[in-house]
Image (cartoon, helix red, strand yellow):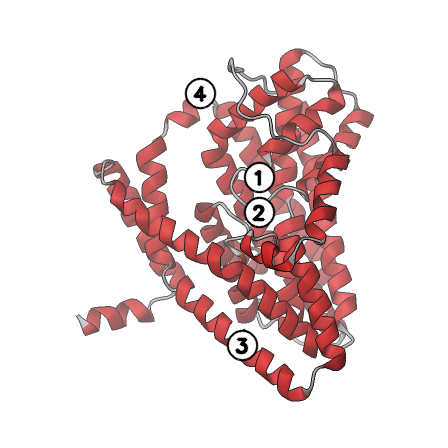
Amino acid sequence: MNKIIKTWSNMSLILRILIGLIIGAVLGFLFPQASWISLFGDIFVGALKAIAPVLVFVLVISSLSRANSGIGKKFRTVIILYMLSTFLAAIVAVFASFLFPVTLKLTETAVTDTAPEGISEVLYSLLNNIVANPVEALVNANYIGILTWAVIFGLALKRYASDSTKRVLNDISDAVSLAVRWVISLAPFGILGLIFQSVSANGLGIFTDYGKLLCLLVGCMLAVALIVDPLIAGICLHRNPYPLVLRCFKESGLTAFFTRSSAANIPINMSLCEKLGLDKDLYSVSIPLGATINMDGAAITITVMTMAAAHTVGTAVDIPTAIILSILSALAACGASGVAGGSLLLIPMACSLFGIGNDIAMQVVGVGFIVSVVQDSFETAINSSGDVLFAATAEYREWIKNGREVKF
């Protein structure tokens, strides 16, 4: 038994995850009624979601209290890359929807009536989240609020805290990071439970009823992830970005695909940033921020579903209006929560741009929930892997300027 455990522990985490994935898929096909297997996935995702707010809060405070003055320039670059990528993702979705128009089979009833009614409501919600009570922000995993208060506390401690206090904060940060590594080591069992849950509950029927819509959504996401984002990174780095892109997919996108939560994947991404040798002061802030504003997949989902609604009801869409939709989708995507299905409730807001009523728009949301088992997995995978990609791009760009060797 000790030999088996040692062999298992010496395997790379990715290989162990792939083993868990295969076993989970086989069990899902052979024993779909063994629902207790999905408990492994629920526990893993729950543990990630529980530790992520604490990790972000502690790491940001510790990093900023010790941060050097050069961090600001790299951080600005990260934000620009996040926003540019999200906007270009919406543009890709618009033109793909023109080239391959899709109409929907709308249901009879709406799914919910809690969707925001306009971009002002989304922005108002974001501003409220910024000034939320810090304890409530931690409890509710409100990452905008967590980041805001962590930055305030971190800057205050940088100015007034003694060196011994800063060392204590660093020790606490290291302890939380170690706890995260323990949780991540359970990923193979978590993925086993998650893939079992997906296979046993959904099968392949979803591809037959909404295949064309899924192909358009997934095609746009893959185009952004494999062409647009690497192009941005390549222009910034002046070298082949694909080794970095593929590593981000392998070590971040894979787990994000199954957890379907950018927030839950924050600990995974921070661990990957550490492996890439990135500055902890940078990625401790940029990764949780990316889970909030780097939303390529969400922008694609909002845009494609809105264009499909317009095609379904026969609304003509011109190029200028489509560009406005891209801007609106990019801004709205930043307000999408970092959990499964967060982008779907923003579809009615985008539909209002074309005068599509809330009754029709909410039926489109219903279709979105039907395909979300596939759509949301791909969406989260490209969002989360992009967080690491652009955090690394911003830092490696400075390394290259300073003549420092970069190895992906």
- The spot of residue 222 in percent (x, y) is 57, 41
Residue drawn at x 48%, y 25% is 211
The front one of 151 and 183 is 151
Amino acid type of the residue tagged 1 in the rendering: Gly
- The spot of residue 259 in percent (x, y) is 45, 48
Q: Which residue is mark 4?
A: 209
Q: Secondary structure at mark 4?
A: helix
User: Is the C terminus in the top left, top right, bottom left or bottom right quadrant?
Assistant: bottom right
Regarding residue 240, the answer to whether it shows in the image is no
- In the picture, the disc for residue 338 is 2
Between marks 2 and 4 in the image, the one whose residue lies nearer the viewer = 2
Q: Which residue is mark 1?
A: 342
Residue drawn at x 57%, y 39% is 342
Q: Earlier in the sequence, mark 3 or mark 2?
A: 3
Amino acid type of the residue tagged 3 in the rendering: Ile
Could you tell whether 350 is left or right of 272 in the image? right
Amino acid type of the residue tagged 2 in the rendering: Gly
**Cα–Cα span, label 4 and label 3:** 51 Å
Amino acid type of the residue tagged 4 in the rendering: Asp
Q: Earlier in the sequence, mark 2 or mark 4?
A: 4
- Label 3 CA crowd tier, 10 Å (few <14, some 14–19, many 20+): some
User: Is the N terminus in the top left, top right, bottom left or bottom right quadrant?
Assistant: bottom left
- Label 4 CA crowd tier, 10 Å (few <14, some 14–19, many 20+): few
The front one of 115 and 296 is 115
